[in-house]
Image (spheres, helix red, strand yellow):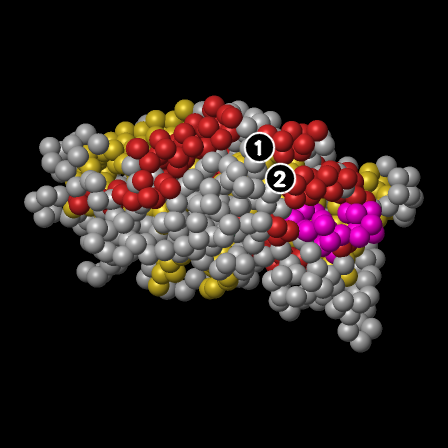
Amino acid sequence: MAINDISRISRPMLGVLAVFAFPALAHAGARFDPATHQFRLDGGAVTYAFGVNSAGALQSLYWGPQLAATDRLEAVTPPDLSGMDPSSSITPQEYPGWGRGFYTEPALKLAYPNGARDVVLTFVSGHAEGDSITVEMADIARPLHVSLRYTIDPATGIVGRSAIIRNDTAAPVRIDQASSAAWSLPQSDDYHLHYLTGRWAAEWTLQDRAITQGATVIESRRGSTGMQANPWFAIDRAGLTSEENGPVWFGALAWSGSWRISVDRNPMGDVRVVGGFNPFDFAYRLKPGETLETPVFYAGYSDQGMGGASRLMHHFERTKILPQSSAPKLRPILYNSWEATEFAVNEKGQMALAEKAAQIGVERFVMDDGWFGARNTDHAGLGDWTVNRTKFPNGLKPLIDKVHSLGMEFGLWVEPEMVNPDSDLYRAHPDWVINFPGRPRSEQRNQLMLNLARSDVRDFVLKAIDDLVSKNDIQFLKWDYNRNWSEPGWPEVDPQDQPRIYVAYIRNLYGIFAELRKRHPKLEIEDCSGGGGRVDLGIMGLTDQVWTSDNTDPFDRLSIQDGFTHAYAPAVMMDWVTDSPSWVNKRTTTLDYRFLSAMQGSLGIGADLNKWTETDFAGAARMVAAYKQVRQTVQQGDLYRLIRPTDASERAATLYVSPDRRQAVLFAFLHSSTKYDPQSRIHLAGLDPEKQYRVHAIDAAPGAVGETQSGAYWMRYGADVSMTGDFQARGLVFEEL
Ligand code: GLA
């Protein structure tokens, strides 16, 4: 969007409240002009501005490419369009309460004991400091207060928004809907919405639909993030935006419980995105003096297409969200035994796998499910976090010592939020699970959910995992979560307070992660939920990496990983090399193809090494060594999706460029050759056009010399990456001379 497009968000000149201008020198950060009651956030290449209009409402003014410091904006209260569309409903409010005439998605809806159910928020005060703004709002008649928080990331221009609702009335107030933010886009009639959907073994499917009048709702009612939809959106302009060009507004919620994002276009053509706690089955009773804080909803803008939008997200996650953001550590190459052994783990078998994994350069050995309690299938044992003495007669120590002696870290699978009815824990505490009294306790994967909202259950889970990590020399946990909620009751509290479980559970989960990290600063955690079922910016703030999908077929993974990287960074995306034919679809692929597919994120190996030949070991060692040469670029560089692996595409290609542009890594894949079809050159991106780059195969012997050309040549003339056959792959590295 060009700068002069801001005219699109101004209204017919009625009720002009004020204009404002900021000092030309102080351009980045947060500003509040008390004279005009206008706010502005500048960061990256983005400006976000809002102000108080003549009705006292907080109104969006601008969100897009950066404006000049001297530019003036106007907070114009739109007039009533008619008796049917009053000003109150069509004003692009920053945080609309459901009150007065308001007919689109509110941010806040509540109910008082006397039956009144409206809230009309007006501006009280504002404050800007550094990169943050706080705005105090109050209802027009009752002491019901809302603090709105804004921050802007100076590097990416990503804005974080949340709200704290405070009941200062003398009676309880029931919050029926509490969003984190409402985002207003400039007026345009060609917006397209992109979002991610999926199911088990098929997560991260990119959806795309025109934003016409009416609402699109993406959500989870499952108690957790879910793989059926992910709390991320991107909106582009159909005619203008491509993978690398044009405007994209995007955002993601930092919440791992039930959530909702609604995108609607009102009769005026205004597009708004409202997101936060899912209002479905939500009812949060605030006693006098109590507060409810929403999750943070982050959103940004790029004029470099979907690719630019995801690079901003990746950078923001690496530098601002992940626990290691201050000092990012490269992801160790991991081996996980799940696909090799399933539940049949034991000391001898795991030691044998560990020896083989060490031979190929693995850095972290992870024992998956089956090591604890009476866990031989998924019918029993969850909840009993003591070592199974039949499988490990001497405890875990001999295995852990062995793994360490082989030069690898040791990691363990846990699923602490769950219990099998067939477990000692459930027999002792049948009341600890989420349930509605007198109703069936629906099992999924033969398990029930512990009610983490209860403080005794939270304390048990924290202690069980803390003991495990304290008593064993464990560097890593794979933290799994293999079902969704049902019968979401909390019988021990007043029925009116039971729905608080949706918030209290997640806050306690976050508290457990935070406390574990505090007590064990070197411990790393992988977030897993039957695959990629609980990936969001909330849990990413407390975990180091995520399991992308149980589907490890390397061709299916191309599109799964493509969808994933639209929202989340390759650095956290765990990709394993597993056996061929794949258990998912019986597809046969070469070991090199499997490696090149998995090397596009954080590399792991999940194959049954007992079945490998000498050739497999040699090939794997070669590819692991190659990955170590490029992983910094893959994990911390800029990703360009050069050819997206849509269902129809014959080829797919990704490129990773190091931040200093000295190294670029190209992964290219061919589904199948047909009729001698010529393959066009692949055009690189992100290189320095003036510099010379020499290319070599990713697994070339040291010193191999390949073609040298300028960055301009590789980007404009392109690289010949021809392949022939079915399921072919090539990896090329371009090094600056
Ligand atoms: C889930 C995970 C798998 C594996 C199994 C173990 O399905 O996604 O990777 O850990 O649980 O039961």
The quadrant of the picture occupied by the C terminus is top right
Horizontally, residue 334 falls left or right of residue 717, namely left
244 relative to 477, above or below: below
Q: Give the range drawn in magenta.
A: 593-620
Spatial CA span between label 2 and label 1: 9 Å
Q: Which of marks 2 and 1 is nearer the N terminus?
A: 2
Crowd tier of the residue under label 2, counting other residues whose Cα lies within 10 Å: few below 14, some 14–19, many 20 or above:
some
Residue tagged by mark 2? 347
The answer to whether the residue labelled 2 contacts the one labelled 1, judged by CB atoms less than 8 Å apart, is: yes
Residue at 86 percent of width and 46 percent of height: 700
Residue wearing tag 1: 394
Residue 677 placement (x, y as % from top left): 80, 72
Quadrant of residue 442 within the rendered picture: bottom left
Instruction: State the image quarter where residue 217 is shown.
Output: bottom left
> Magenta includes 422?
no
Q: Is 290 left, or right, of 647 in this rendering?
A: left
User: Quick check: 545 left or right of 422?
Assistant: right
